[in-house]
Image (cartoon, helix red, strand yellow):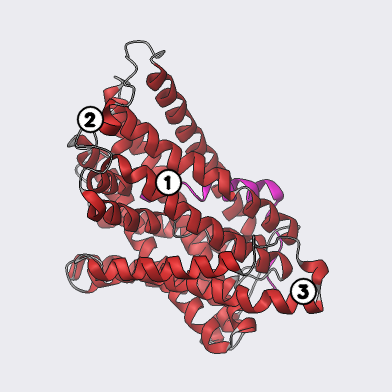
Amino acid sequence: PSLSHGLKQRHLSMIALGGVIGAGLFVGSGAGVAAAGPSIVVAYALSGLLVMLVMRMLGEMSAANPASGSFSVHAERAIGPWAGFTAGWMFWITLCVALAVEAIGAAGIMVQWFPGTDSWMWVALFMAVFCGTNLAAVSNFGEFEFWFAALKIAAITVFLALGVLAILGVLPGTDAPGGSHLTGDGGFLPNGADGLVVGLLASVFAYGGLETVTIAAAESENPVKSVAGAVRTVMWRIALFYVGSMLVVVTLIPWNDKAVVEKGPYVAVLDHLDIPAAGDIMNVIVLIALLSAMNANIYGASRMSYSLVSRGEGPAFLGRVSGGVPRFTVLASSFFGFVAVLLSYWWPDTIFKWLLNMVGAAVLVVWAFIAAAQLRSRSRLQREAPERLVVKMWLFPYLTWVALAAMAGVLVLMLREDDTR
């Protein structure tokens, strides 16, 4: 039995739109703002350009050969089985560790709302719910993600609209700040190049997980059309949601405001605008973003491991499919995620911290495999099946080499920083 094609075009469109809006944007961006100051806008723009190139390369290969293993399959075909094995299992571990982080974060919000409860109860509940939805038909996953993504997009759209009105000075009770916060609180680069580097690293890792849409596309009604559409819209999505919202934050409030880190930049801005219950509203949005990421990560991890197993690169018993769903890989991925949660309780400063730091480097390694595979597969496609090049990488091969050089540059920057070395 093979995987089903139960994802509709509306599911894929919303997954592509909402997948870029993660908890890393709502919560993790505060540390980046505190380190880089107003230049965080440049950091997100630079890392966003790199992600656009990676997604374009991945889109070219996925539209030509849709596969649930996505870049792992492309790396295997272009470079060799060792490349597919390495990229695939590294990505699987990355998603499972991220799943644990999201479950802990979501449980933390619930404990704030229900002080008498324990964190592990909420972790177990969320894990069980999303393991269950992923064990059922793939359309259930698609439906959950459709509504999660719709809520996230609505929230960030309202935030951007309020921010722009406040910047223009037309929101009641606000004065146009002009460029005072962009240049007045220590300048555009208040912590120099070192601060920009920290912001750049934080922003690169916030983009991790965008690749899941090319995995999901393989189970859609029209994989080629779905991939092409998702990849072609990635540029304006990154520019609007990430770069746009960071620009709103640093224009409206001082970058060194303690609330930016303590409450998160979005809550800090809403508080500044005197929006009632700003903290509670953003907690709901962050919870939705975390639950959405949990759902997507169990899905992505299960499909990646299923693809690896079906190619003989994992335990064979995990490869059984029933009802169009690889249920054993869903269970295995959820189990590993739950083990990672336990590691965070038992060894928070050793094993779990090491796993967290590994995630950042693993994302760059996966991207490097995507670039290397695209370099080799493009010439083969042009020679053997040019009609399958529905999506084309810009300025090939020059921009592919630029992307590889940028990845190497980020790895070098990681070596310079104590927290990422």
**Label 1 belongs to which residue?**
289
The residue indicated by pointer 3 is: 382
Residue numbers of the magenta segment: 1-25
**Residue at image location 70% in from the left, 49% down from the top:** 9
Give residue 208's quadrant in the image. Answer: bottom left
Give the residue at x 27% y 56%: 198
- Assess whether residue 11 is covered by the magenta stretch: yes
Cα–Cα span, label 1 and label 3? 40 Å
Q: Earlier in the sequence, mark 1 or mark 3?
A: 1
Quarter in which the C terminus is drawn = bottom left
Label 2 sits on residue: 184
Numbered disc in front, either 1 or 3: 3
Badge 2 or badge 1: first in the primary sequence: 2
Say what secondary structure mark 3 lies in.
Answer: helix
User: Judging from the image, what secondary structure is the residue with disc 2 in?
Assistant: loop
* Crowd band around label 1 with a 10 angstrom C-alpha radius: few (<14), some (14–19), many (20+): many
Q: Amino acid at mark 2?
A: Gly
**Position of residue 3 measured from the top left corner of the image (x, y, whole percent):** 68, 69
> Could you say where residue 81 lies in the image, as x and y percent from the top left?
57, 88
Of 101 and 262, nearer the camera is 262
**Residue 256 vs residue 320: left or right?**
left
Residue situated in front as seen by the camera: 143 or 70: 70
Q: Position of residue 90 (x, y in %)?
A: 43, 76
Amino acid at dot 3? Gln
